[in-house]
Amino acid sequence: MNPITRLGELGVHLPDVLIPRSSIDLERWAVIACDQFTSDPDYWAAVETFVGDAPSTLRIVLPEIYLEEDSDAPTAYDDIKATMQQYLDSDVFRKIERSAVYVRRHLRGGGTRRGIVLALDLERYDYHRGSDSLVRASEETIPSRLPARIAIREGAAIETPHVLVLYDDPDARITNDLDTATAAAPPLYDTSLMMEGGRVEGFRIGADDDAVNGLAEAFGELSSREKYGFLFATGDGNHSLAAAKDVWESHKRDGASMDDPRRYCLVELVNLHDSGLPMHPIHRIAGTKEGTLLDELLHRADARFHGMSASRLVDHMERDRLSGNEIGFLGPVQSGILSLPEEAALPVGLVDEAITAVDTPSVDYTHGLNDTIRAAEKSGSVAIFLPEIDRSTLFPTIARKGALPRKAFSLGEARDKRYYLECRKL
């Protein structure tokens, strides 16, 4: 079977990828995912200063820190779409026809994450609970988070991805083969990333390259021996992929052809077992009375609370980390560790239920121990620290129970998230 046809059966499409021309400063072009640093206005102010008037993906996305109920979001949407069209009209891009991009992201703390930028067929994706689709959501999709993303994508001239989609390749056959295939190839791009983001390089994998045969064969084998009932699961950017799905379904209802570019969404495929893909917990910052929240957690989880000083708690989490049945609690007055029974539900689910039960007026989601502590201290709120999820349990858990609770895990620290770089015309 033709490898392109085989990949299509697996929901994979090789699109025409848009890359900034050599005259564009890629360090100012590439900006971190819009859902990062939502409690850190200083970060985004620094990005704004660094980018200045240069062409940048900062002008074609909307950082979520600015996405507030009383904001000028509708005007921002119009500005974003106008800039997209301007970039197309002003010849900012060069087109890489019918290609995937093999990405090597060199992380600031060491290590390399390897991924494949291509388009997923939204006909093979369903984010709803109980889905039996080839591409599934790894975390619960919150309907209220979709309208802003839909508003930007609807009528947009281009897309740029921060979506990471996982596949389960314990032997790393796919990326090892791509390392070999691109060993002597010149990169499409190679750039440092702003704000201590490390460095990234990308290599073209064209539709006629031998490497595409290997991709089709390897993904086909993963699919044929797949024991979970699905091949791909979203890792980061679940709501952005869900918004793309809703936009496509709307266009389809209005009579769009199956060749419509909105049928596909540009993503980066990453091996769940990639050595450069740490799975970190996403912590919570809750703006509520700490005693009330602690009581609710103890009651709901039937947990034991081991009180300790804030410094001792932080030292424990830095040195030993939390076990799978522990929750760290750091408030302005009380601090310690909640130990859950072995049979308890996932800690992230219990924490979210408790936060909802006490009617917390504000909740933020943060990555990294020190960033969470700083954000909680700055706002006088309670920081709740969650344990890491064992990656080997992720696909089996999705297969058995469906999507995990919202913000259950993070693929790397905040500064290691995907930066917008490649684009695709819609």
Image (spheres, helix red, strand yellow):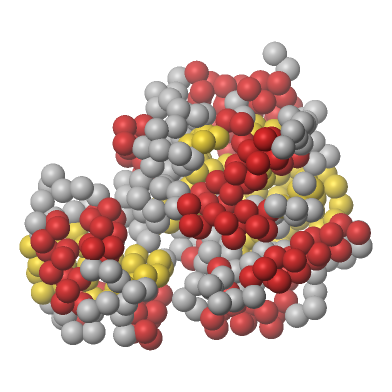
Percent from the top left, x then y, of residue 161? 65, 52
Is 337 on the left-hand or right-hand side of 5? left
Q: Spot the residue most to the right.
A: 90
Is 46 or 142 nearer to us in this picture? 142
Q: Is 213 drawn above or below residue 88 in the view shown?
A: above
Q: Spot the residue most to the front.
A: 254
The image quadrant of residue 255 is top right
Is 364 on the left-hand or right-hand side of 60? left
Q: Spot the residue most to the top.
A: 1
Q: Is 292 drawn above or below residue 9 in the view shown?
A: below
Percent from the top left, x then y, of residue 304? 8, 62
Residue drawn at x 54%, y 31% is: 173
Residue drawn at x 65%, y 26% is: 7
In this rendering, the count of numbered labels is 0
Is 209 on the left-hand or right-hand side of 117? right
Percent from the top left, x then y, of residue 392? 34, 39
Is 100 on the left-hand or right-hand side of 234? right
Is 288 or 38 nearer to us in this picture? 288
